[in-house]
Amino acid sequence: MFQKILIANRGEIALRVLRACKELGIQTVVVHSTADADAMHVRLADESVCIGPPPSRDSYLNIHQIVAACEITGADAVHPGYGFLSENAKFADILAAHNITFIGPSGDHIRIMGDKIEAKRTAKRLGIPVVPGSDGAVTDQKEARRIAAEIGYPVIIKASAGGGGRGMKVALTEADLEIALQTASTEAGAAFGDDAVYIEKYLEKPRHIEVQVFGDGFGRGVHFGERDCSLQRRHQKVWEEAPSPALNAEERARIGGICAKAIADLGYSGAGTIEFLYENGEFYFIEMNTRLQVEHPVTEAITGIDLVHEQIRVASGGGLSVKQEDIKFNGHAIECRINAEDPRTFTPSPGTITHFHTPGGLGIRVDSGVYSGYKIPPYYDSLIGKLIVHGRNRVECMMRLRRALDEFVVDGIKTTLPLFRDLVGNADIANGDYDIHWLEKSLAKED
Ligand code: ADP
């Protein structure tokens, strides 16, 4: 087991990982920018190292500073959290070259899944169902027209290097295709330094369903069930739940089994998420994330298993603490992402939190890095906390969520709490009857 882990992140996820390390008796080092000197993760860690000025490219994305911080403090492993360097293959390789363990998969597996065209090809080879579309990158208009006609309109053009919902363009008919291909490719080049794009069938009313998987480091793969993340705004998840209200036990076991086998065949090690769109009873792979996800706590709530403990165990060579047959699903969990944003316009609302009171009681978990008097720096993403609620079934979970949202107080800044108070009272949400476009349509109706 590791003696000392360096946490290369900030905010709620830095604290989340820190808690797991403390429970396992592992010393913790955190890194921080000058803007985060007063952050909670800095206060609670055994040691902290300031790695640079506020902009993330000079601090949380500065590989050399982070490796230096490991060497100064004698950390033997790095947990990257999510975002920042968590899916950076070069970072994983550099750590390995310094004999520091990256708590995550190999650099090669990150590289394959980071390139969406390569990821889709790999998924197909491993027997995972994929969205119909081009086999690789599409550059010329003629080829694009041929493929689009073959799969049928509407189609979506996506950036191979894409992420965070950026670089996607929909073409409803052939008349839109030329401009969609051009703009997607130009935007991808500007945003990711790689203008490769590919074409997929655009699914009109899918749900976003993702499967939590783990490779144990010894060639075995398991799944921890699915999460439904269909409530999205600008392709960003807002509300996540487990299990999905749309799946039955047979579908769950089928897709879970396919994913666990694929992970084993790939020789993957550590936590991963295989993302699908789901429509008319069919699953279509869209991408794999090779890291812990923001929404992992809903899986923890229904399985009772600490996924960060498992990540640390696997990375240290100790394997998983559970086998597939030990993973049982119990009840229902929902997570709300609370952002420092205007709940109508979603513009960021940094500032000082004058009062912060979190709900409590049975089935309530709040993962957050903020406190009363905390000043939110304007440099990073606007997530200030996650409310995760568990109940014996979805009805009890929703009742508890409504009560917890009423108790939650964040004063001094705007947050997305009012949005969730609306959602929890909505009939479609109560019925679990929503797809990936539901939230945007419903927000548009109110304007
Ligand atoms: P990113 O890596 O940028 O998050 P994804 O491939 O995971 O991109 O897609 C993000 C979201 O975009 C999905 O959850 C879904 O809402 C939408 N999307 C992606 N591909 C399709 C598709 N083929 N049809 C319809 N919507 C799609």
Image: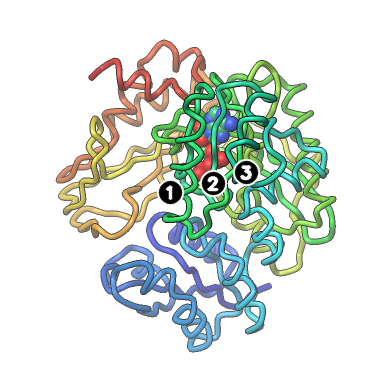
**Residue 17 at x, y percent in the picture:** 51, 60
Q: Residues within 10 Å of mark 2 (few under 14, many from 20)?
A: many
Amino acid type of the residue that numbered disc 1 sits on in the rendered structure: Glu
Image location (x, y in percent) of residue 127: 82, 38
Residue occupying image coordinates x 51% and y 73%: 6
The picture quadrant for ligand 1 comes to: top right
State whether residue 229 appears in this view: no
Q: Earlier in the sequence, mark 2 or mark 3?
A: 3
Residue 111: % across, % down: 65, 61
Q: Amino acid at mark 2?
A: Ala
Q: Nearer the viewer, mark 3 or mark 1?
A: 3
Res 65 quadrant in image: bottom left
Disc 2 under 8 Å from ligand 1? The reply is yes
The circle on residue 202 is none
Q: Label 3 belongs to which residue? A: 138
Find out whether the residues at labels 2 and 1 contact each other: C-beta distance under 8 Å.
Answer: yes
Q: Write the residue at 50% across / 56% down.
A: 82
Nearer to us of marks 2 and 3 is 3
**Does residue 435 appear in the picture of this structure?**
yes
175 lies left or right of 358:
right
**Residue count near mark 3 (Cα–Cα under 10 Å), binned few <14, some 14–19, many ≥20:** some
Q: Is residue 335 left or right of residue 141?
A: left
Of callouts 2 and 1, the N-terminal one: 2
Q: Which mark is residue 187?
A: 1
Q: What number is the disc on residue 159?
A: 2
Query: What is the distance, in whole Å, between disc 3 and disc 1 at their CAs?
Result: 15 Å
Residue at the extreme bottom of the image, as rendered: 72
**Dot 1 alpha-carbon crowd within 10 angstroms: few under 14, some 14 to 19, many 20 or more:** some
